[in-house]
Structure formats: C-alpha cells, structure tokens
Image (cartoon, rainbow, N blue to C red):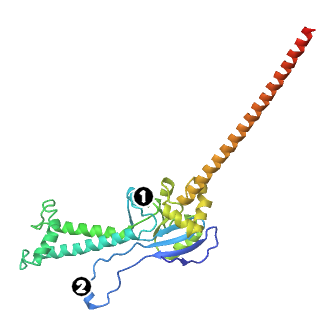
Amino acid sequence: MPWIESEPFLSSHHIISVARNTHDNVGPIKSYLEIFFPKGLQFKEASLFFYKDNVEGYYNFIVTQKNPLFLPNWVSEIIQIFGNQHINTANLRTLQEWTFGFLNKFRVLCEIRAAMWWWLMFNPYQEPFNTLRVLTEWYLTAFTGTFPIILGIDIGPSISISLLGFILDGLNRLVFTMPYLPSEGEKFNITNLSTLDNPALVNLIGKLDVEEVRIFRYLPSLWYKYPIPDNLREYWYTKKPEILQYFLKNYGNLEIDFLPDRILEAEYENQINHEILNTNINHLETTSTHLISSVNELLLNNILITKISNLSQLSEIIFNK
C-alpha cells in the first residue's frame, strides 16, 4: 500500500506519512436494469487510515469504520501467534471477502427457494429446482418446529435467512487490528477528541469528517508478551533500519529482541568466545602465579638444604678437632 506524504504539523509529534485503506463498492445506479435487478449486498473493506509518527511509531492506524466489529482478544492472539498473521492482513481480508461472497450467494439461493414455496406451479422435485432444494432446504428447515407457527406460516425459514443477513452484516463490519489486540484501541469522538495527547493527530482526524474513531498506536502488547517474528525483525534490519532505530531508541530498555535472530546468535557467540578467552587468560595468570610460587619455594628449599649441609660439615670439622 503506498504511503501518501501528509502536511507537516507544528508540534512535538510529527506525522511522517498517511495512507488510506477504504473501498466503497456500492456505487450509484447506472442503468434501468439495476433498478429491477439490484446488485444486492456488496463487500466493503474496513475504512482505515495508517500513519507514521516520530513518537508513536510506524504501525499506527485509525479505524473510521461505522459500528466496527472486532474479534475477541483471544481469537486475535491465536491468529497472530499460531497463524503467523502479524502485520499483513491481506490473507485474512481475502478469506473474509471469499466467505462473504459465498454466504451471500447462498442467501440468494435460500431466498429463491423460500419464494418457490408460494408458487405451487414449480415442482421442487424436478430439475433444476430439485438441485436448488437439495442445496438449501437442509438449512431453511433447520429451525422448523423451534419457533411457533404464526397464522399457519412457519417462520423458521425467515429466521434462517435473517440469520444469514446478520452474519453477512458482521463480516462487512469486521475489522482486523493486527499487530494490536482489539482492546488496545483508544476510542475517541467529537466530544472528547480534544483530550488526545497528539495535536497533529487531532488535526488529521478533524479532516476525516467522522464522528467516532479508534486509534491503535505505540508498541503492540503482544510484542511484550511474545517474541517479535524473526522475519519482521530481519525486514527492519535489512530494509527498514529507521524502524529498527526507532524501536531500539524508545523501547531498547524493555529487554525485547528487536534484532534478527542471526545477529543475536552472532553476538551471543562473540560474547561466549570473549568469556572463554577471559577465562583462559585468568587461568593462565593463575597458573603462572602458582608456578612462580612453586619455583620460589623450590629455590628456597634448595638454599635451606645447602645451608644445613654447610652447617653439618662445619660441625663435623669442629668436633674432629
């Protein structure tokens, strides 16, 4: 996604760049055919603004989606840690869009099958209606007998179709917050936006013309709890050294590994080799000291023996006289 340079702001915070991720697939009606055959539900990606700030970091973003829906924290954590979906959510968005499209087509088939119950001229056991019946009736009749019959009408199929619409609406409002957990988002609206501690960000949000936003910024909490993925750290080290320098400068005292594993392993090996060298030097010094002491003791013993021998010889000479 390309980053768009933003206007500079005169404050302690400086927003380096801004990028927008929003697509509105619902366009105006362009022909009479669309009046009678509307496109129906369309998938819309979440409305997000990504920004870089010299204080808040490089992975900040603002959710401007109306009535956004977020995953539970534990689900988001599992996806990030065990699914290896940390920064790039393209695969998740593709899965989200594919699921929406599949369920939307299934909803249309269910509506056609439910409408055919009112038209007795269609034999549901003849093709192609039999295939439609096999594909949808298992779902439409799932709630039969669960809800009371009103005026002789089973409302189970209507509940089933409404449930599909509810799921589709949730998929359309679902926002992925990687690398953050959903609970890390700070909620601001027009009334309390002035309490935001980043004047540059206040000015930026004011230009978006939205009533409510959620801001995800600073260091993600999962990077405190779990090691940062090595491929991401390698990317910082080789291609984005400014990001690495930012983290080392602002969070280097938290004992978090921001360098890639190969660099950490090399530093660890150098440290081990240095410790081994120091140990050998200390051992050599200790051995040399012991050797010198032993030699001194040996020389001292030889001198004493010589003196004793001389005294013995002198004593013999005296006694012989």
Q: Is residue 16 above or below residue 84?
A: below
Spot occupied by residue 291 in the image (x, y as percentages of width and height): 74, 35
Residue 70 as seen in the image, left or right of residue 13: left
Q: Residue furthest right?
A: 321
Residue occupying the point 14% across, 76% down: 115
State which quadrant residue 109 falls in: bottom left
Residue occupying the point 16% across, 63% down: 142
State which quadrant residue 15 falls in: bottom right
Query: How would you rate the neighbour count of disc 2 (Cα within 10 Å): few for under 14, some for 14-19, many for 20 or more?
Result: few
Query: How would you rate the neighbour count of disc 1 (Cα within 10 Å): few for under 14, some for 14-19, many for 20 or more?
Result: some
Secondary element at image label 1: helix
Regarding residue 193, the answer to whether it shows in the image is no
- Which residue is denoted by mark 1 in the rendering? 81
| Residue type beneath disc 1 | Ile
Spot occupied by residue 232 in the image (x, y as percentages of width and height): 50, 64
Residue occupying the point 35% across, 84% down: 27
- Give the position of the C terminus as an image quadrant: top right
Secondary element at image label 2: loop
| Residue type beneath disc 2 | Phe
Q: Which numbered disc, 1 or 2, marks the residue closer to the eye?
A: 1
State which quadrant residue 161 falls in: bottom left
- Which residue is denoted by mark 2 in the rendering? 37
Q: Nearer the viewer, residue 210 or 274?
A: 274
Residue 154 as seen in the image, left or right of residue 230: left
Instruction: Tell me whether circle 1 and circle 2 mark residues in contact (CB < 8 Å).
Output: no
